[in-house]
Image (cartoon, rainbow, N blue to C red):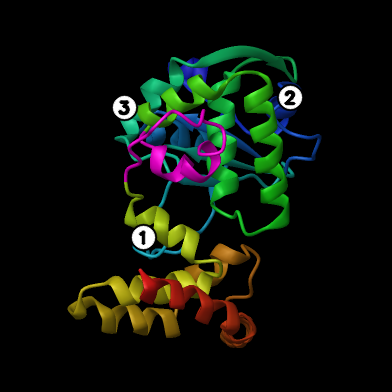
Amino acid sequence: MADSLGVRAFFIKGPASVIQGLRMPRTSSDVDVFVHPSDLEAIVAGLRERGWRERPVDPDGRTFPKHSVTVDHPKWPCCIDVHFRFPGMETAPSDCFDVMWARTENLELAGQELRVPTESLGIVILALHALRSAHLPACRQELEFLRDLTEREQHVAAVMDLAVATGSLAAMRPFLEGLLPGRETVEWPDASGEWRNRLMAKQPGSARLIAIAQAPLREKPGMIFHAVFPAPVVHLSRDIYADMTLPGRVRSHRTRWVRFLRSAPQVMRDLSQLRKG
């Protein structure tokens, strides 16, 4: 479809990463594709014409900044996640795409000739993805695997250059510091507010409270109201089959509050980091 539309698209993570040796074998639950921001609507429209539908999303863009559009199909057992930017990459999304596109290569998969990241770009993408949740054992394991690979295959310089070109040097710092020669000095930029918030918010409830705390005073009442009384689409963003009748919505509200209360200790720890910052 991308070829027929003349859209540049390359596929990230997933089975291609396993074939390239960038990841341990695993089962993928979705397909991740990257397109230029100006081509996002064309791709989504093309998928829509073929029976794919956009999944509901939380409309609160301050709390959950958007970086992709997810679509599903009633006859396919997986989603497609169409990326137009990548968290941690602070260069303008259009420029960032051009940098990445220049570092893609062909790979045959499922009977198709696909564009996928080169090894060095694949390492950057996978490392950024794992760094967002580095508190999880699986992500720590993946980061260690990528560090060993980067050093063994001598990708450190290429990964460093990509981190600079994509504006991800600040986000990649925990991954890169141990790989650089001891004599090399780097001027590490400060991480963006969005990236710091992503790292602090280990629970969805934390993300909302952090966003409310950082919002201008005039916006806080509305954000608090929508956090306490979310729109129906918020329930659907978690479960597209959620019961939207009045009793069903009441049950969803109850489940949401139970989930929040159970995560309260972690939420408090996340908020304590905000106070320190």
Going from N to C along the chain, the mark reached first, 1 or 2, is 2
Does 7 appear in magenta?
no
Q: Which secondary structure dominates the residues rendered in magenta?
A: loop
Q: CA distance from mark 3 to mark 1?
A: 22 Å
Q: Nearer the viewer, residue 32 or 41?
A: 32
**Would residue 229 be visible to someone looking at this image?**
no
Q: Which residue is mark 2?
A: 21
Q: CA distance from mark 3 to mark 2?
A: 28 Å
Residue 139 at x, y percent in the picture: 67, 49
Task: Describe the element under mark 1 as helix, strand or loop.
Answer: loop
Task: Describe the element under mark 3 as helix, strand or loop.
Answer: helix
Residue 262 at x, y percent in the picture: 65, 84
Residue 41 at x, y percent in the picture: 38, 36
Q: Which residue is mark 1?
A: 61
Task: Describe the element under mark 2 as helix, strand or loop.
Answer: loop
The residue at 46%/31% (across/down) is 43
Q: Which residue is mark 3?
A: 95
The amino acid type of the residue labelled 1 equals Gly
Using the image, determine if residue 271 lies above or below residue 88.
below
